[in-house]
Amino acid sequence: MIPQIINGLIFASILFLVATGLTIIFGILRVVNFSHGSFYLLGIYIAYSITRFSQDTILYLASPFIAGALAGCVGMAFERGLLSRVYGRGELFELLMTYGMIFVFIDVFRIGWGTMPISDPTITFRLGTVSIAGYTMPLYNIYLIAIAAILAVVLWYLLFRTKVGMIIRATSFDKEVTSSFGVNVNRVYALTFFLGCFLAGFGGGLMLPVTGAWIGLDIDMLIIGLVVVVVGGLGSIKGALVASLLIGLVRSFGISMFPAIELAIVYVIMIAVLIVKPSGLFGGVEH
Amino acid sequence: MRDFRILYAVIAILLFIVPFVGEYPTYLTGLALLFGISALALNVLLGYTGLLSFGNALFFGTGAYTVGLLIKHYDITAIEILFPASIATSFVVAVMVGFICVRHTRIYFTMLTIALASLFYALAHKLRPITGGDDGIRIYDTYLFGKEIASVTEFYYLILVFFFASMLTLRIILKSPFGLTLQAIRDSEMRARFAGISITKYRLGSFIVSGVFTGMAGALYALFLGQISPDDVLGLTRSGELVAMTILGGFTSFTGPVVGAFVFTYLKAFVSSALIYWYMVAGIIIIGIVLFVPLGIMGEIERRLLWRR
Protein backbone atom coordinates (compact mmCIF):
# COMPACT_ATOMS: atom_id res chain seq x y z
CA MET A 1 0.00 0.00 0.00
CA ILE A 2 2.59 2.58 1.16
CA PRO A 3 4.69 2.58 -2.04
CA GLN A 4 1.57 2.99 -4.19
CA ILE A 5 0.39 5.87 -2.02
CA ILE A 6 3.79 7.60 -2.19
CA ASN A 7 4.00 7.09 -5.95
CA GLY A 8 0.44 8.33 -6.29
CA LEU A 9 1.26 11.43 -4.26
CA ILE A 10 4.33 12.15 -6.40
CA PHE A 11 2.24 11.90 -9.51
CA ALA A 12 -0.52 13.96 -7.88
CA SER A 13 1.99 16.69 -6.90
CA ILE A 14 3.20 17.07 -10.45
CA LEU A 15 -0.32 16.92 -11.86
CA PHE A 16 -1.35 19.60 -9.39
CA LEU A 17 1.47 21.93 -10.51
CA VAL A 18 0.74 21.40 -14.20
CA ALA A 19 -3.05 21.51 -13.90
CA THR A 20 -3.04 24.58 -11.65
CA GLY A 21 -0.96 26.42 -14.22
CA LEU A 22 -3.42 25.44 -16.95
CA THR A 23 -6.42 26.40 -14.86
CA ILE A 24 -5.01 29.78 -13.72
CA ILE A 25 -4.15 30.72 -17.29
CA PHE A 26 -7.63 29.71 -18.38
CA GLY A 27 -9.25 31.55 -15.50
CA ILE A 28 -7.61 34.86 -16.45
CA LEU A 29 -6.97 34.71 -20.18
CA ARG A 30 -9.79 32.31 -21.18
CA VAL A 31 -7.19 30.41 -23.20
CA VAL A 32 -6.38 26.74 -22.76
CA ASN A 33 -2.63 26.66 -23.19
CA PHE A 34 -2.00 23.64 -25.41
CA SER A 35 1.74 24.17 -25.12
CA HIS A 36 1.59 23.67 -21.35
CA GLY A 37 3.10 20.19 -21.59
CA SER A 38 5.94 21.71 -23.61
CA PHE A 39 6.70 24.16 -20.81
CA TYR A 40 6.77 21.21 -18.42
CA LEU A 41 9.22 19.43 -20.69
CA LEU A 42 11.23 22.64 -21.08
CA GLY A 43 11.53 22.71 -17.27
CA ILE A 44 13.05 19.22 -17.22
CA TYR A 45 15.52 20.04 -19.99
CA ILE A 46 16.60 23.30 -18.33
CA ALA A 47 17.08 21.57 -14.97
CA TYR A 48 19.16 18.96 -16.79
CA SER A 49 21.38 21.63 -18.32
CA ILE A 50 21.78 23.41 -14.97
CA THR A 51 22.93 20.22 -13.25
CA ARG A 52 25.48 19.69 -16.07
CA PHE A 53 27.25 22.84 -14.85
CA SER A 54 28.06 21.58 -11.41
CA GLN A 55 27.30 18.53 -9.31
CA ASP A 56 26.61 20.65 -6.25
CA THR A 57 23.69 19.36 -4.10
CA ILE A 58 22.33 22.86 -3.50
CA LEU A 59 22.32 23.52 -7.23
CA TYR A 60 20.45 20.26 -7.76
CA LEU A 61 17.81 21.30 -5.28
CA ALA A 62 17.63 24.83 -6.69
CA SER A 63 17.41 23.71 -10.32
CA PRO A 64 13.58 23.34 -10.38
CA PHE A 65 13.21 26.95 -9.23
CA ILE A 66 15.58 28.26 -11.91
CA ALA A 67 13.96 26.03 -14.52
CA GLY A 68 10.52 27.28 -13.48
CA ALA A 69 11.60 30.93 -13.63
CA LEU A 70 13.15 30.50 -17.09
CA ALA A 71 10.12 28.58 -18.39
CA GLY A 72 7.96 31.36 -16.94
CA CYS A 73 9.98 33.99 -18.81
CA VAL A 74 9.68 32.06 -22.08
CA GLY A 75 5.94 31.76 -21.44
CA MET A 76 5.61 35.46 -20.75
CA ALA A 77 7.56 36.33 -23.89
CA PHE A 78 5.28 34.03 -25.89
CA GLU A 79 2.16 35.64 -24.41
CA ARG A 80 3.37 39.21 -24.99
CA GLY A 81 4.97 38.62 -28.37
CA LEU A 82 2.52 36.26 -30.08
CA LEU A 83 -0.56 35.23 -28.16
CA SER A 84 -1.65 38.76 -27.22
CA ARG A 85 -1.90 39.62 -30.92
CA VAL A 86 -4.89 37.33 -31.43
CA TYR A 87 -6.97 38.22 -28.36
CA GLY A 88 -10.55 38.93 -29.25
CA ARG A 89 -10.43 36.94 -32.47
CA GLY A 90 -12.01 33.88 -30.88
CA GLU A 91 -10.69 30.92 -29.00
CA LEU A 92 -10.06 28.93 -32.19
CA PHE A 93 -7.07 31.12 -33.05
CA GLU A 94 -5.73 31.32 -29.51
CA LEU A 95 -5.88 27.54 -29.21
CA LEU A 96 -4.21 27.05 -32.58
CA MET A 97 -1.39 29.37 -31.71
CA THR A 98 -0.58 27.50 -28.49
CA TYR A 99 -0.95 24.27 -30.47
CA GLY A 100 1.54 25.51 -33.05
CA MET A 101 4.00 26.24 -30.24
CA ILE A 102 4.06 22.52 -29.36
CA PHE A 103 5.79 21.84 -32.69
CA VAL A 104 8.17 24.75 -32.45
CA PHE A 105 9.17 23.43 -29.01
CA ILE A 106 9.65 19.87 -30.26
CA ASP A 107 12.35 20.97 -32.69
CA VAL A 108 13.87 23.36 -30.14
CA PHE A 109 14.25 20.35 -27.82
CA ARG A 110 15.70 18.22 -30.59
CA ILE A 111 18.21 20.92 -31.53
CA GLY A 112 19.10 21.79 -27.94
CA TRP A 113 19.09 18.44 -26.19
CA GLY A 114 19.09 15.81 -28.91
CA THR A 115 16.52 13.16 -29.66
CA MET A 116 17.53 10.62 -27.02
CA PRO A 117 15.75 10.49 -23.64
CA ILE A 118 17.65 12.19 -20.81
CA SER A 119 17.67 11.51 -17.08
CA ASP A 120 19.77 12.32 -14.04
CA PRO A 121 18.88 10.54 -10.80
CA THR A 122 22.09 11.68 -9.01
CA ILE A 123 20.22 13.68 -6.39
CA THR A 124 18.08 10.70 -5.31
CA PHE A 125 21.27 8.74 -4.51
CA ARG A 126 22.79 11.77 -2.82
CA LEU A 127 19.85 12.30 -0.47
CA GLY A 128 19.72 8.63 0.53
CA THR A 129 16.68 6.67 1.57
CA VAL A 130 14.07 6.79 4.28
CA SER A 131 11.96 4.05 5.86
CA ILE A 132 8.21 4.44 6.26
CA ALA A 133 6.25 1.55 7.83
CA GLY A 134 8.92 -0.91 6.78
CA TYR A 135 9.18 0.30 3.18
CA THR A 136 12.45 1.88 2.07
CA MET A 137 12.16 4.67 -0.46
CA PRO A 138 14.27 7.59 -1.69
CA LEU A 139 14.11 10.64 0.57
CA TYR A 140 13.85 12.71 -2.60
CA ASN A 141 10.33 11.35 -3.18
CA ILE A 142 9.22 12.70 0.20
CA TYR A 143 11.01 16.00 -0.52
CA LEU A 144 9.19 16.30 -3.84
CA ILE A 145 5.77 15.82 -2.25
CA ALA A 146 6.60 18.24 0.57
CA ILE A 147 7.87 20.97 -1.72
CA ALA A 148 4.80 20.66 -3.95
CA ALA A 149 2.58 20.93 -0.87
CA ILE A 150 4.49 24.02 0.31
CA LEU A 151 4.14 25.54 -3.14
CA ALA A 152 0.40 24.89 -3.03
CA VAL A 153 0.19 26.82 0.24
CA VAL A 154 2.34 29.67 -1.12
CA LEU A 155 0.13 29.82 -4.20
CA TRP A 156 -2.99 29.94 -2.06
CA TYR A 157 -1.45 32.76 0.01
CA LEU A 158 -0.38 34.63 -3.13
CA LEU A 159 -3.81 34.44 -4.72
CA PHE A 160 -6.06 34.89 -1.71
CA ARG A 161 -4.05 36.96 0.78
CA THR A 162 -2.04 39.46 -1.26
CA LYS A 163 -2.97 42.48 -3.34
CA VAL A 164 -1.49 40.98 -6.51
CA GLY A 165 -3.64 37.90 -5.95
CA MET A 166 -6.68 40.08 -5.47
CA ILE A 167 -6.01 41.85 -8.76
CA ILE A 168 -5.56 38.51 -10.51
CA ARG A 169 -8.83 37.21 -9.11
CA ALA A 170 -10.61 40.44 -9.95
CA THR A 171 -9.36 40.22 -13.55
CA SER A 172 -10.62 36.69 -13.83
CA PHE A 173 -13.99 37.83 -12.49
CA ASP A 174 -14.48 40.87 -14.69
CA LYS A 175 -11.80 42.21 -17.00
CA GLU A 176 -13.55 45.46 -17.97
CA VAL A 177 -14.41 46.56 -14.44
CA THR A 178 -10.92 45.71 -13.20
CA SER A 179 -9.27 47.76 -15.93
CA SER A 180 -11.63 50.67 -15.19
CA PHE A 181 -10.15 50.68 -11.69
CA GLY A 182 -6.82 51.54 -13.22
CA VAL A 183 -5.34 48.06 -13.34
CA ASN A 184 -3.16 47.36 -16.34
CA VAL A 185 -4.85 44.15 -17.47
CA ASN A 186 -2.11 43.36 -19.98
CA ARG A 187 0.40 43.17 -17.16
CA VAL A 188 -1.92 40.84 -15.27
CA TYR A 189 -2.09 38.62 -18.37
CA ALA A 190 1.69 38.54 -18.65
CA LEU A 191 2.10 37.84 -14.94
CA THR A 192 -0.48 35.06 -15.08
CA PHE A 193 1.24 33.43 -18.01
CA PHE A 194 4.52 33.67 -16.17
CA LEU A 195 2.99 32.07 -13.09
CA GLY A 196 1.31 29.27 -15.06
CA CYS A 197 4.45 28.43 -17.02
CA PHE A 198 6.55 28.73 -13.87
CA LEU A 199 4.42 26.05 -12.23
CA ALA A 200 4.76 23.77 -15.26
CA GLY A 201 8.52 24.30 -15.54
CA PHE A 202 8.97 23.88 -11.80
CA GLY A 203 7.05 20.60 -11.86
CA GLY A 204 9.24 19.48 -14.74
CA GLY A 205 12.43 20.39 -12.87
CA LEU A 206 11.29 18.36 -9.88
CA MET A 207 10.69 15.31 -12.06
CA LEU A 208 14.14 15.26 -13.70
CA PRO A 209 15.53 12.75 -11.15
CA VAL A 210 12.34 10.65 -11.19
CA THR A 211 11.37 10.18 -14.83
CA GLY A 212 13.77 12.25 -16.92
CA ALA A 213 12.54 13.61 -20.23
CA TRP A 214 11.80 12.42 -23.72
CA ILE A 215 10.05 14.00 -26.67
CA GLY A 216 6.42 12.90 -26.50
CA LEU A 217 6.21 13.52 -22.77
CA ASP A 218 4.97 17.02 -23.62
CA ILE A 219 1.79 15.74 -25.26
CA ASP A 220 1.28 13.01 -22.62
CA MET A 221 1.51 15.64 -19.90
CA LEU A 222 -0.78 18.04 -21.74
CA ILE A 223 -3.48 15.40 -22.13
CA ILE A 224 -3.36 14.19 -18.55
CA GLY A 225 -3.29 17.82 -17.38
CA LEU A 226 -6.38 18.54 -19.47
CA VAL A 227 -8.10 15.51 -17.94
CA VAL A 228 -7.33 16.78 -14.42
CA VAL A 229 -8.63 20.23 -15.29
CA VAL A 230 -11.80 18.82 -16.85
CA VAL A 231 -12.47 16.56 -13.85
CA GLY A 232 -11.74 19.33 -11.34
CA GLY A 233 -13.68 21.97 -13.18
CA LEU A 234 -12.13 24.47 -15.58
CA GLY A 235 -10.75 27.51 -13.77
CA SER A 236 -10.99 26.01 -10.27
CA ILE A 237 -7.76 25.64 -8.27
CA LYS A 238 -9.51 23.63 -5.56
CA GLY A 239 -10.81 21.36 -8.31
CA ALA A 240 -7.29 20.95 -9.71
CA LEU A 241 -6.05 19.93 -6.25
CA VAL A 242 -8.77 17.35 -5.62
CA ALA A 243 -8.69 15.98 -9.16
CA SER A 244 -4.90 15.62 -9.21
CA LEU A 245 -4.98 13.70 -5.93
CA LEU A 246 -7.77 11.50 -7.28
CA ILE A 247 -6.11 10.83 -10.60
CA GLY A 248 -2.62 10.52 -9.15
CA LEU A 249 -3.68 7.87 -6.67
CA VAL A 250 -5.98 6.03 -9.08
CA ARG A 251 -3.22 5.89 -11.64
CA SER A 252 -0.65 4.68 -9.13
CA PHE A 253 -2.91 1.87 -7.88
CA GLY A 254 -3.98 1.19 -11.46
CA ILE A 255 -0.37 0.69 -12.55
CA SER A 256 0.23 -1.91 -9.83
CA MET A 257 -3.11 -3.70 -10.23
CA PHE A 258 -4.21 -3.37 -13.88
CA PRO A 259 -1.11 -2.26 -15.76
CA ALA A 260 -2.70 -2.82 -19.16
CA ILE A 261 -5.55 -0.39 -18.70
CA GLU A 262 -4.32 2.10 -16.06
CA LEU A 263 -4.68 5.08 -18.37
CA ALA A 264 -8.07 3.90 -19.56
CA ILE A 265 -9.30 3.89 -15.95
CA VAL A 266 -8.33 7.55 -15.65
CA TYR A 267 -10.38 8.41 -18.75
CA VAL A 268 -13.31 6.35 -17.53
CA ILE A 269 -13.31 8.34 -14.28
CA MET A 270 -13.32 11.49 -16.32
CA ILE A 271 -16.25 10.35 -18.43
CA ALA A 272 -18.15 9.27 -15.30
CA VAL A 273 -17.60 12.65 -13.63
CA LEU A 274 -18.72 14.47 -16.74
CA ILE A 275 -21.89 12.45 -17.14
CA VAL A 276 -22.85 13.06 -13.50
CA LYS A 277 -21.60 16.66 -13.32
CA PRO A 278 -20.83 18.17 -16.73
CA SER A 279 -18.97 21.18 -15.33
CA GLY A 280 -16.50 19.05 -13.35
CA LEU A 281 -16.24 18.51 -9.60
CA PHE A 282 -15.79 22.16 -8.61
CA GLY A 283 -16.71 23.97 -11.78
CA GLY A 284 -19.59 26.36 -11.52
CA VAL A 285 -18.48 28.39 -14.53
CA GLU A 286 -20.95 29.17 -17.27
CA HIS A 287 -20.82 26.98 -20.37
CA MET B 1 -20.28 30.45 -61.66
CA ARG B 2 -19.47 29.10 -65.11
CA ASP B 3 -15.70 29.70 -64.76
CA PHE B 4 -15.83 27.79 -61.48
CA ARG B 5 -17.38 24.80 -63.25
CA ILE B 6 -14.60 24.83 -65.80
CA LEU B 7 -12.06 25.04 -62.99
CA TYR B 8 -13.64 22.07 -61.21
CA ALA B 9 -13.66 20.06 -64.44
CA VAL B 10 -9.98 20.82 -65.04
CA ILE B 11 -9.12 19.76 -61.46
CA ALA B 12 -11.12 16.55 -61.87
CA ILE B 13 -9.26 15.70 -65.08
CA LEU B 14 -5.92 16.52 -63.46
CA LEU B 15 -6.75 14.25 -60.52
CA PHE B 16 -7.71 11.52 -62.96
CA ILE B 17 -4.38 11.58 -64.83
CA VAL B 18 -2.13 11.78 -61.76
CA PRO B 19 -1.25 8.03 -61.84
CA PHE B 20 0.29 8.52 -65.30
CA VAL B 21 2.82 10.95 -63.80
CA GLY B 22 4.43 8.50 -61.42
CA GLU B 23 3.98 6.41 -58.33
CA TYR B 24 5.13 8.93 -55.72
CA PRO B 25 2.85 11.78 -56.87
CA THR B 26 0.00 9.25 -56.97
CA TYR B 27 0.74 8.20 -53.42
CA LEU B 28 0.92 11.81 -52.19
CA THR B 29 -2.22 12.83 -54.01
CA GLY B 30 -4.04 9.79 -52.62
CA LEU B 31 -3.05 10.84 -49.11
CA ALA B 32 -4.08 14.43 -49.78
CA LEU B 33 -7.49 13.26 -51.02
CA LEU B 34 -8.04 11.16 -47.88
CA PHE B 35 -6.96 13.96 -45.56
CA GLY B 36 -9.05 16.34 -47.67
CA ILE B 37 -12.21 14.36 -46.92
CA SER B 38 -11.22 14.14 -43.24
CA ALA B 39 -10.63 17.89 -43.06
CA LEU B 40 -13.90 18.52 -44.87
CA ALA B 41 -15.64 16.31 -42.31
CA LEU B 42 -13.93 18.19 -39.51
CA ASN B 43 -15.19 21.42 -41.04
CA VAL B 44 -18.78 20.16 -40.83
CA LEU B 45 -18.22 20.61 -37.10
CA LEU B 46 -15.89 23.61 -37.13
CA GLY B 47 -17.08 25.79 -39.99
CA TYR B 48 -20.73 24.81 -40.15
CA THR B 49 -21.61 23.98 -36.53
CA GLY B 50 -19.07 26.16 -34.72
CA LEU B 51 -17.58 23.31 -32.69
CA LEU B 52 -13.82 22.76 -32.73
CA SER B 53 -12.97 19.07 -32.48
CA PHE B 54 -9.37 18.36 -31.57
CA GLY B 55 -10.11 14.63 -31.41
CA ASN B 56 -11.27 13.69 -34.89
CA ALA B 57 -8.38 11.22 -35.14
CA LEU B 58 -10.67 9.10 -32.97
CA PHE B 59 -12.88 8.46 -36.01
CA PHE B 60 -9.96 8.24 -38.40
CA GLY B 61 -8.49 5.61 -36.09
CA THR B 62 -11.82 3.83 -35.62
CA GLY B 63 -12.15 3.40 -39.37
CA ALA B 64 -8.54 2.32 -39.76
CA TYR B 65 -8.62 -0.09 -36.81
CA THR B 66 -11.91 -1.62 -37.93
CA VAL B 67 -10.17 -2.63 -41.14
CA GLY B 68 -7.02 -3.71 -39.31
CA LEU B 69 -8.75 -5.76 -36.62
CA LEU B 70 -11.14 -7.50 -39.03
CA ILE B 71 -8.21 -8.55 -41.20
CA LYS B 72 -6.01 -9.54 -38.28
CA HIS B 73 -8.54 -11.53 -36.26
CA TYR B 74 -11.19 -12.68 -38.75
CA ASP B 75 -9.27 -12.83 -42.05
CA ILE B 76 -11.88 -10.71 -43.77
CA THR B 77 -10.15 -9.36 -46.84
CA ALA B 78 -13.10 -8.20 -48.92
CA ILE B 79 -13.14 -4.41 -49.16
CA GLU B 80 -16.88 -4.52 -49.88
CA ILE B 81 -17.30 -5.88 -46.32
CA LEU B 82 -14.48 -3.94 -44.60
CA PHE B 83 -15.65 -0.57 -45.83
CA PRO B 84 -19.30 -0.78 -44.67
CA ALA B 85 -18.04 -2.28 -41.40
CA SER B 86 -15.94 0.81 -40.75
CA ILE B 87 -18.89 3.03 -41.56
CA ALA B 88 -20.90 1.08 -38.97
CA THR B 89 -18.24 1.24 -36.25
CA SER B 90 -17.51 4.94 -36.76
CA PHE B 91 -21.25 5.59 -36.66
CA VAL B 92 -21.59 3.74 -33.34
CA VAL B 93 -18.51 5.45 -31.86
CA ALA B 94 -19.73 8.85 -33.06
CA VAL B 95 -23.11 8.32 -31.41
CA MET B 96 -21.53 7.25 -28.11
CA VAL B 97 -18.83 9.91 -28.01
CA GLY B 98 -21.16 12.56 -29.41
CA PHE B 99 -23.66 11.87 -26.67
CA ILE B 100 -21.01 12.91 -24.12
CA CYS B 101 -19.47 15.75 -26.11
CA VAL B 102 -22.29 17.73 -27.69
CA ARG B 103 -23.79 18.71 -24.37
CA HIS B 104 -20.80 21.04 -24.16
CA THR B 105 -19.70 23.81 -26.47
CA ARG B 106 -16.65 25.94 -27.04
CA ILE B 107 -13.50 24.98 -25.18
CA TYR B 108 -15.25 22.31 -23.10
CA PHE B 109 -16.25 20.50 -26.26
CA THR B 110 -12.71 20.75 -27.60
CA MET B 111 -11.13 19.36 -24.43
CA LEU B 112 -13.63 16.50 -24.27
CA THR B 113 -12.89 15.46 -27.83
CA ILE B 114 -9.18 15.39 -26.95
CA ALA B 115 -9.77 13.33 -23.82
CA LEU B 116 -12.06 10.80 -25.51
CA ALA B 117 -9.70 10.39 -28.44
CA SER B 118 -6.93 9.82 -25.89
CA LEU B 119 -8.99 7.07 -24.27
CA PHE B 120 -9.14 5.17 -27.55
CA TYR B 121 -5.46 5.91 -28.17
CA ALA B 122 -4.57 4.49 -24.74
CA LEU B 123 -6.64 1.36 -25.41
CA ALA B 124 -5.09 0.78 -28.83
CA HIS B 125 -1.69 1.31 -27.28
CA LYS B 126 -2.09 -0.91 -24.23
CA LEU B 127 -4.29 -3.80 -25.40
CA ARG B 128 -1.36 -5.36 -27.21
CA PRO B 129 -2.86 -8.87 -27.69
CA ILE B 130 -5.79 -7.38 -29.60
CA THR B 131 -4.40 -4.32 -31.34
CA GLY B 132 -0.70 -5.14 -31.56
CA GLY B 133 0.18 -2.18 -29.32
CA ASP B 134 2.47 0.44 -30.80
CA ASP B 135 3.68 -1.97 -33.47
CA GLY B 136 0.23 -1.57 -34.96
CA ILE B 137 -1.27 -3.84 -37.58
CA ARG B 138 -0.12 -4.73 -41.06
CA ILE B 139 -2.77 -4.88 -43.72
CA TYR B 140 -2.28 -6.83 -46.95
CA ASP B 141 -4.06 -9.01 -49.50
CA THR B 142 -7.29 -7.08 -49.82
CA TYR B 143 -9.85 -7.82 -52.50
CA LEU B 144 -12.62 -5.81 -54.09
CA PHE B 145 -15.34 -8.10 -55.52
CA GLY B 146 -12.87 -10.94 -55.78
CA LYS B 147 -10.17 -8.93 -57.54
CA GLU B 148 -7.00 -8.23 -55.60
CA ILE B 149 -6.28 -4.54 -55.09
CA ALA B 150 -2.59 -4.08 -54.49
CA SER B 151 -0.98 -1.33 -56.53
CA VAL B 152 -0.91 2.33 -55.55
CA THR B 153 -2.78 3.20 -58.74
CA GLU B 154 -5.66 0.80 -58.01
CA PHE B 155 -6.06 2.20 -54.53
CA TYR B 156 -5.75 5.72 -55.88
CA TYR B 157 -8.76 5.30 -58.15
CA LEU B 158 -10.70 3.73 -55.29
CA ILE B 159 -9.88 6.79 -53.19
CA LEU B 160 -10.74 9.14 -56.04
CA VAL B 161 -14.21 7.59 -56.43
CA PHE B 162 -14.71 7.86 -52.68
CA PHE B 163 -13.47 11.46 -52.76
CA PHE B 164 -15.93 12.63 -55.40
CA ALA B 165 -18.79 10.73 -53.77
CA SER B 166 -18.01 12.28 -50.37
CA MET B 167 -17.62 15.81 -51.75
CA LEU B 168 -20.99 15.50 -53.43
CA THR B 169 -22.72 13.94 -50.41
CA LEU B 170 -21.30 16.49 -47.97
CA ARG B 171 -22.24 19.33 -50.33
CA ILE B 172 -25.82 18.01 -50.46
CA ILE B 173 -25.95 17.51 -46.68
CA LEU B 174 -24.69 21.02 -45.98
CA LYS B 175 -27.10 22.61 -48.48
CA SER B 176 -30.02 20.62 -47.06
CA PRO B 177 -32.38 21.99 -44.38
CA PHE B 178 -30.26 20.01 -41.89
CA GLY B 179 -27.07 21.79 -42.93
CA LEU B 180 -28.73 25.19 -42.95
CA THR B 181 -30.11 24.58 -39.47
CA LEU B 182 -26.58 23.78 -38.27
CA GLN B 183 -25.41 27.14 -39.58
CA ALA B 184 -28.35 28.88 -37.93
CA ILE B 185 -27.37 27.29 -34.61
CA ARG B 186 -23.75 28.31 -35.16
CA ASP B 187 -24.71 31.94 -35.82
CA SER B 188 -27.10 32.27 -32.91
CA GLU B 189 -27.84 29.45 -30.56
CA MET B 190 -30.42 31.53 -28.74
CA ARG B 191 -32.36 32.41 -31.88
CA ALA B 192 -32.35 28.79 -33.03
CA ARG B 193 -33.59 27.69 -29.64
CA PHE B 194 -36.45 30.17 -29.81
CA ALA B 195 -37.33 28.84 -33.23
CA GLY B 196 -37.98 25.50 -31.53
CA ILE B 197 -34.91 23.69 -32.84
CA SER B 198 -33.48 20.90 -30.69
CA ILE B 199 -29.89 22.14 -30.57
CA THR B 200 -28.38 19.01 -29.05
CA LYS B 201 -29.99 16.76 -31.65
CA TYR B 202 -28.62 18.81 -34.53
CA ARG B 203 -25.17 19.02 -32.97
CA LEU B 204 -25.18 15.25 -32.49
CA GLY B 205 -26.22 14.89 -36.13
CA SER B 206 -23.32 17.06 -37.22
CA PHE B 207 -20.96 15.08 -35.01
CA ILE B 208 -22.13 11.81 -36.58
CA VAL B 209 -21.75 13.13 -40.13
CA SER B 210 -18.23 14.29 -39.27
CA GLY B 211 -17.38 11.00 -37.59
CA VAL B 212 -18.67 8.72 -40.33
CA PHE B 213 -16.87 10.53 -43.16
CA THR B 214 -13.64 10.69 -41.16
CA GLY B 215 -14.04 6.98 -40.36
CA MET B 216 -14.41 6.11 -44.05
CA ALA B 217 -11.27 8.11 -44.87
CA GLY B 218 -9.46 6.29 -42.05
CA ALA B 219 -10.52 2.90 -43.42
CA LEU B 220 -9.19 3.77 -46.87
CA TYR B 221 -6.01 5.14 -45.29
CA ALA B 222 -5.40 1.77 -43.60
CA LEU B 223 -5.92 -0.08 -46.89
CA PHE B 224 -3.82 2.44 -48.83
CA LEU B 225 -0.83 2.44 -46.49
CA GLY B 226 -1.01 -1.21 -45.45
CA GLN B 227 0.23 -0.33 -41.97
CA ILE B 228 -1.43 1.45 -39.05
CA SER B 229 -0.28 2.33 -35.55
CA PRO B 230 -1.91 4.20 -32.66
CA ASP B 231 0.40 7.20 -33.05
CA ASP B 232 -0.27 7.46 -36.75
CA VAL B 233 -4.06 7.18 -36.81
CA LEU B 234 -5.25 7.94 -33.26
CA GLY B 235 -2.72 10.42 -31.82
CA LEU B 236 -3.31 14.05 -30.90
CA THR B 237 -0.99 15.12 -33.71
CA ARG B 238 -3.25 13.43 -36.28
CA SER B 239 -6.25 15.35 -34.89
CA GLY B 240 -4.21 18.54 -34.82
CA GLU B 241 -3.04 18.03 -38.39
CA LEU B 242 -6.64 17.84 -39.55
CA VAL B 243 -7.39 21.11 -37.74
CA ALA B 244 -4.27 22.72 -39.20
CA MET B 245 -5.24 21.66 -42.74
CA THR B 246 -8.74 23.03 -42.28
CA ILE B 247 -7.48 26.39 -41.04
CA LEU B 248 -4.75 26.56 -43.66
CA GLY B 249 -7.30 26.06 -46.45
CA GLY B 250 -9.95 28.18 -44.78
CA PHE B 251 -12.80 27.04 -42.58
CA THR B 252 -15.24 29.59 -43.99
CA SER B 253 -15.12 28.00 -47.42
CA PHE B 254 -16.55 24.63 -48.47
CA THR B 255 -13.53 23.64 -50.56
CA GLY B 256 -11.04 25.27 -48.17
CA PRO B 257 -10.23 22.17 -46.10
CA VAL B 258 -9.46 20.14 -49.25
CA VAL B 259 -7.12 22.86 -50.53
CA GLY B 260 -5.52 22.97 -47.07
CA ALA B 261 -5.05 19.20 -47.07
CA PHE B 262 -3.34 19.31 -50.47
CA VAL B 263 -1.03 22.18 -49.55
CA PHE B 264 -0.21 20.64 -46.16
CA THR B 265 0.44 17.12 -47.48
CA TYR B 266 2.67 18.28 -50.34
CA LEU B 267 4.48 20.81 -48.17
CA LYS B 268 5.11 18.17 -45.51
CA ALA B 269 6.52 15.76 -48.09
CA PHE B 270 8.81 18.36 -49.66
CA VAL B 271 9.99 19.99 -46.44
CA SER B 272 10.69 16.71 -44.66
CA SER B 273 12.71 15.47 -47.62
CA ALA B 274 14.78 18.66 -47.64
CA LEU B 275 15.44 19.27 -43.95
CA ILE B 276 14.84 17.44 -40.68
CA TYR B 277 13.01 20.24 -38.92
CA TRP B 278 9.54 19.70 -40.33
CA TYR B 279 7.95 20.20 -36.88
CA MET B 280 9.41 23.67 -36.55
CA VAL B 281 8.16 24.58 -40.03
CA ALA B 282 4.70 23.18 -39.26
CA GLY B 283 4.53 25.15 -36.02
CA ILE B 284 5.59 28.36 -37.72
CA ILE B 285 3.07 27.80 -40.52
CA ILE B 286 0.25 27.31 -37.99
CA ILE B 287 1.26 30.41 -36.02
CA GLY B 288 1.73 32.40 -39.22
CA ILE B 289 -1.71 31.43 -40.53
CA VAL B 290 -3.27 32.45 -37.22
CA LEU B 291 -1.46 35.80 -37.23
CA PHE B 292 -1.62 36.84 -40.85
CA VAL B 293 -4.17 34.79 -42.83
CA PRO B 294 -6.86 33.76 -40.33
CA LEU B 295 -9.36 33.06 -43.11
CA GLY B 296 -7.01 30.58 -44.77
CA ILE B 297 -6.12 30.29 -48.45
CA MET B 298 -9.64 29.90 -49.86
CA GLY B 299 -11.18 32.30 -47.36
CA GLU B 300 -8.68 34.96 -48.41
CA ILE B 301 -9.26 34.31 -52.13
CA GLU B 302 -13.02 34.46 -51.71
CA ARG B 303 -12.73 37.68 -49.71
CA ARG B 304 -10.61 39.32 -52.40
CA LEU B 305 -12.99 38.18 -55.15
CA LEU B 306 -15.91 39.67 -53.22
CA TRP B 307 -14.05 42.95 -52.77
CA ARG B 308 -13.36 43.22 -56.47
CA ARG B 309 -17.04 43.00 -57.40
Image: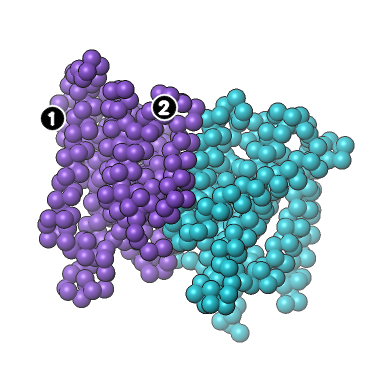
Chain colours: A purple, B cyan
**Residue at image mark 1:** A58
Q: Amino acid at mark 2?
A: Ile
Q: CA distance from mark 1 to mark 2?
A: 33 Å
**Picture quadrant of residue B127:** top right
Looking at the rendering, in which quadrant would you find the N terminus of chain A?
top left
Q: Position of residue B28 (x, y in %)?
A: 67, 47
Does B257 sit left or right of B292 as displayed? Answer: right
Q: Amino acid at mark 1?
A: Ile
| Marks 1 and 2, the one that precedes in the sequence | 1
**Res. A220 mark:** none
Does A214 sit left or right of B243 as displayed? Answer: left
Tags 1 and 2 both on a single chain: yes
Q: Which chain is mark 2 on?
A: A
User: Farthest residue in the front direction?
Assistant: A276
| In this view, the mark in front (1 or 2) | 2
At horizontal 62% and vertical 72% (from top left) the residue drawn is: B181
At horizontal 21% and vertical 61% (from top left) the residue drawn is: A168
User: Farthest residue in the right direction?
Assistant: B146
**Residue at image mark 2:** A255
User: Farthest residue in the top direction?
Assistant: A134
Secondary element under disc 1, as helix, strand or loop, is helix
On the question of residue B199 being in view, the answer is: yes
**Picture quadrant of residue B234:** top right
Q: Nearer the viewer, residue B79 or B164?
A: B79
How many other residues sit within 10 Å of disc 2, few (<14), some (14-19) or many (≥20)?
some
